[in-house]
Amino acid sequence: MKNREIIIVGGGMVGALSALLLAQQGFVIHLIEKNPVIKLANDAPFDLRVSAFSAQSKKLLEQVGVWQDIPTDRLCAYQGLQTWEVGSSKLTFDSAELGMEALGYIAENSWIQAVLWQALKQLDNVVFYENRALLSIKNNESSVTVILDNQQSIEAELLIGCDGANSATRSLLNIGISAWDYRQHCMLISIKTDCNQQDITWQEFRETGPCAFLPLAKNNASLVWYHSPEKIKMLNSLTNNQLKEILLIEFPKLSFDFNVINKGAFPLTRRHAQTYFKGRAVLLGDAAHTINPLAGQGVNLGFKDVQCLVDLLINSSDLPMNKLLRRYELLRKPHNLLMQTAMDVFYKSSKSNVTLVRLMRKAVLIVAQNSGQLKNRVMKYAMGY
């Protein structure tokens, strides 16, 4: 299927990785992005939106040759992971026990997007449509055509929708979703600490929702606070100094001094597309599924979608397009649904104040911590091994 044309809607991390992998295989790519892609400076403030990249996701970014382009002072490898419930023992993971250099890597979404676009701009088989939005999609038997908001028409053999949770592609295709609101919001808080770079990420579970610490490069870090919409709205209205005072009182104790640099919040919603494709258009990443960010698996699931579809387009190009897209859906949809469900069960049980449930949670953490190689095998699976 080389030298054929593909339209990709959405130039975020999932869309840009899809475009680069396919372009490097000789496909002609039409990349549509509704927002301007800003070139970042090394001294720019840390972005609120960060992700924990698994070893498998790192391998994909290495494969396309952009991992080394991420500035070292914008990337944090973490060697330890800890999770616990108030009053319970800690469940800990350590990269040394697994014989790995790191459990994962935390980086800003904007930097991952930036290095992918930098690589894409060097290719002559990628056509860019920046600051453009979709108006319509028309599926034909052997092609798909889109009309942009400037009335430009683009025809290709396949359309890949990577345009996020509020996907215009999904909407224009009239693909329904199963969705519900978790009735909680999540607050992201960028801080600068008075100590050296941390290398342990942790999460404490509370009845009001989890609290988490994500180390970033140098003496930067990100705090994550789940709570009721009312509480998060109040926190978001505070000045940075006022928020720090609340964190010192109500957030899990931090072993260092810090200053709040930035903050933002968003509601937690689960979505899952009822089908992953229609005609010659297919959905990837958040356009197909969003997951509770509890375990930081969102971007990693999206990258697995990318790898699966790209492998099929390269290695199963003899299949009719409808069968190829059906195979992609059969491979990815059950796995994504399983991860969504697992995170939901974990999330809901972590918030329950029923005595029996609380005792079971604590028992599970103790058993898991003492499970030896089983615990390490589970962690390696989460890392993509």
Image: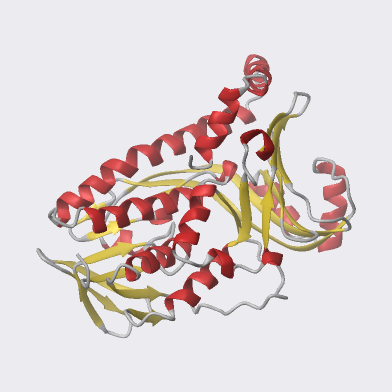
- Quarter residue 294 falls in: top right
Q: Position of residue 126 (x, y in %)?
A: 34, 78
Q: Residue at x 45, y 37 (%)?
A: 339
- The one nearer the camera, 319 or 151, is 319
The residue sitting at 75% across, 24% down in the picture is: 89
Classify residue 92 by image quadrant: top right
Residue 348 vertical placement versus 60 (above, below): above
| Residue 205 visible in the displayed image | no
Answer left or right for 371 relative to 25: right
Can residue 262 be spotted in the picture?
Answer: yes
Looking at the figure, which quarter contains the N terminus? bottom left
Numbered disc total:
0
Q: Judge left or right: residue 43 versus residue 124.
A: right
Query: In this view of the protein, which residue sits in the foreground, 296 or 5?
Result: 5
Where does the image place residue 98, in percent across and percent down from the top left?
A: 62, 35
Residue 198 screen position, x and y as percent:
78, 51
Instruction: Left or right? Give the position of 101 relative to 118.
Output: right
The spot of residue 117 in percent (x, y) is 47, 74
Q: Residue at x 44, y 65 (%)?
A: 64
Camera-side residue of 13 and 161: 13
Placement of 335 over or under 110, stated as above or below: above
Please report the residue visible at 63 percent of the width from the left and 54 percent of the height from the top: 106
Give the quarter of the image for residue 42: bottom right
